[in-house]
Image (cartoon, rainbow, N blue to C red):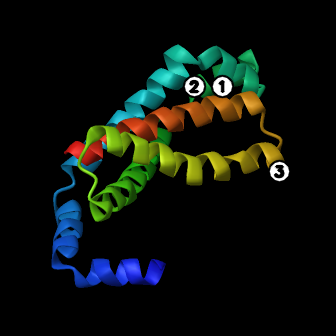
Amino acid sequence: MVKSVWRKVLNNSADRTYIMSVLTNPLAIIVASIALSILGMLWYGSLFSRPWIRAMGWSAKDIAKAKKQSMLPRVALNLFTNLVMMTVLALLIGVLGITSGVTGALFGVLVWLGFIATSSAGSVIWEGYSPVAYAIYGGYMLVGFALTGAILAVW
């Protein structure tokens, strides 16, 4: 079934045109990536900073040390990974023909459930991460994928 879907996509000139438009006009992807980054700043800053710090087991000394380091490399890497995620999400939304903000948000939730929530659960299962940290991260990505799914669908 997967082969037949991709064969249809590759043989359909409208789908090829859409894929090329995503790759040559990335403004929606950039906006969605920035929106996800801003949400992350709010989520881990204003909204959930204290429970997240406790869940990660960081001390005041750890926080002071982190504040002395430059955030620029981490912010740049995070923006890059957001761009990759949003490019793939935009391609999926386009191939499926999703053009409604509500449907885009629901599709974002479905992608979150199928890939983000399940794969990041391994951090709790195998790496000893706190379930609270998982819930905070999972909530951020849930809201983020719903938001960006809507943005990419209506753009």
Position in image of residue 51 (x %, y %): 68, 18
Q: CA distance from mark 2 to mark 1?
A: 5 Å
Q: Which residue is mark 2?
A: 68
Kind of element beneath mark 3: helix
Label total for image: 3
Q: Amino acid at mark 3?
A: Trp
Task: Estimate how packed mark 2 is, as few (under 14), some (14 to 19) or many (20 or more) residues with alpha carbons within 10 Å.
Answer: few
Name the side, left or right, on which 132 lies relative to 5: right
**CB within 8 Å, label 2 to label 1:** yes
Q: Which mark is residue 127?
A: none
Name the side, left or right, on which 108 lies relative to 64: left
Q: Closer to the camera, 31 or 143?
A: 143
Q: Amino acid at mark 2?
A: Lys
Earlier sequence position, callout 1 versus callout 3: 1
Query: Going 45% across and 51% down the picture, which residue do you hit?
Result: 81
Query: Going 72% across and 16% down the picture, which residue do you hit?
Result: 60
Q: Which residue is mark 1?
A: 65
Earlier sequence position, callout 3 versus callout 2: 2
Q: Closer to the camera, 62 or 94?
A: 94
Position in image of residue 148 (x %, y %): 36, 41
Position in image of residue 1 (x %, y %): 48, 79
Visible residue check, residue 73: yes
Q: Amino acid at mark 1?
A: Lys
Task: Estimate how packed mark 1 is, as few (under 14), some (14 to 19) or many (20 or more) residues with alpha carbons within 10 Å.
Answer: few
Position in image of residue 118 (x %, y %): 66, 50
Q: Which residue is mark 3?
A: 126
Task: Estimate how packed mark 3 is, as few (under 14), some (14 to 19) or many (20 or more) residues with alpha carbons within 10 Å.
Answer: few
Name the side, left or right, on which 148 lies relative to 135: left
Q: Is residue 137 above or below residue 48?
A: below
**Displayed quadrant of residue 102:** top left
